[in-house]
Amino acid sequence: MSRNQHTLRTCHSFEGKGLHTGTYAHMKVMPAPAGHGIRFCRTDLPGSPVVDALAENVSNTARSTTISCGKAKAVTIEHIMSALTGLGVDNALIELDNQEVPILDGSAKPYVDAFLKEGLVDQDVPREYIDLPYALEIRDGKSGSWVRIEPADAPSAQVTADFNSRVLGVQTARWDETVDYAREIGVCRTFCFFHEIEPLFRNNLIKGGDVDNAIVVVERPVGQEQLDYVAQLLGQPELHVENGYLSNLRLHFPDECGRHKLLDLLGDFRLAGGFLNARITAFKPGHTINTKAAKALRALLK
């Protein structure tokens, strides 16, 4: 496959609260030269340290993907990484003035809209695709999750999400270079289950979560007292349940949650260091097994 590297035409600015820390951050996604790859720069820290977006720098996968180098880290990077990957951006520098990437609407749509509006720049340098010598498979016996990566002539990915959920059922989503990432994948929002909200808060997560940046699936019957309590946690005046989802939620697709798992996988696998000439098949994927697979891939190539 022959294709040149691309970067952004201009600098793009985003700001908002982080999903897990709840802290407010300003972020700039900037053009970068050919061969640069994707890097995060913490402008709020002395010396503005840089963290390369590579699998060996993954330091935490509790409900999101965090990369670190020394004291510098970037939390919840998967959505911006997915947007850059889905649109074919090889090189970008991401400046961040706090530890967590803003969650925005819980999808990659704000990034996609901004990048497509201004367009990309062809850098007149051939893209170096990552080719596998043989297939690689990673399994998690406890969760039943697995990811298989096979050599192919072009990138593709398929995920099957199964949460044993009466609301979601089993959802399968697929992407390759013929799929319109912006319309079919990038708009799909993150999600969680209603019964997870309180434990996540107790574990110091989703401090910035609300009904505007996440789909909340209501798998079990809940009473008004529970709804009122969660409304207080989320800073909402009131909440209700409709068709298995919290509040007046309109899904972009019936399988939006499955498509979001694909969005996450594309972002996590970008940590392999570039674009893969590979067919990725994943069952019950998550950030932990995604990044383990990306790390194993990089070790294999070394």
Image (cartoon, rainbow, N blue to C red):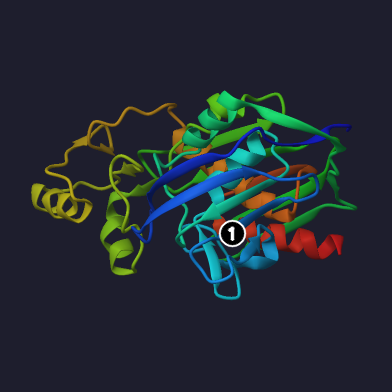
In the picture as drawn, the residue positioned furthest to the bottom comes out as: 70
Residue beneath the point at 87% across and 37% down: 126
Left or right, residue 261 beside residue 298: left
Residue beneath the point at 55% across and 57% down: 287
Left or right, residue 288 beside residue 292: left
Give the percent coordinates (x, y) of residue 86.
64, 35
Give the percent coordinates (x, y) of residue 185.
55, 32
Residue 186 visible in the snapshot: yes
Determine whether 151 is above or below 299 in the image.
above
Q: Which amino acid does label 1 sit on?
A: Cys
Residue beneath the point at 80% across and 49% down: 35
Secondary structure beneath disc 1?
Answer: strand
Q: What residue is pinned by disc 1?
A: 41
Q: Quadrant of residue 57?
A: bottom right
Determine whether 152 is above or below 52 in the image.
above
In the picture as drawn, the residue positioned furthest to the front comes out as: 47
Q: Nearer the viewer, residue 15 or 18?
A: 15
Quarter of the picture containing the N terminus is top right
Left or right, residue 23 beside residue 298: left
Determine whether 156 is above or below 274 in the image.
above
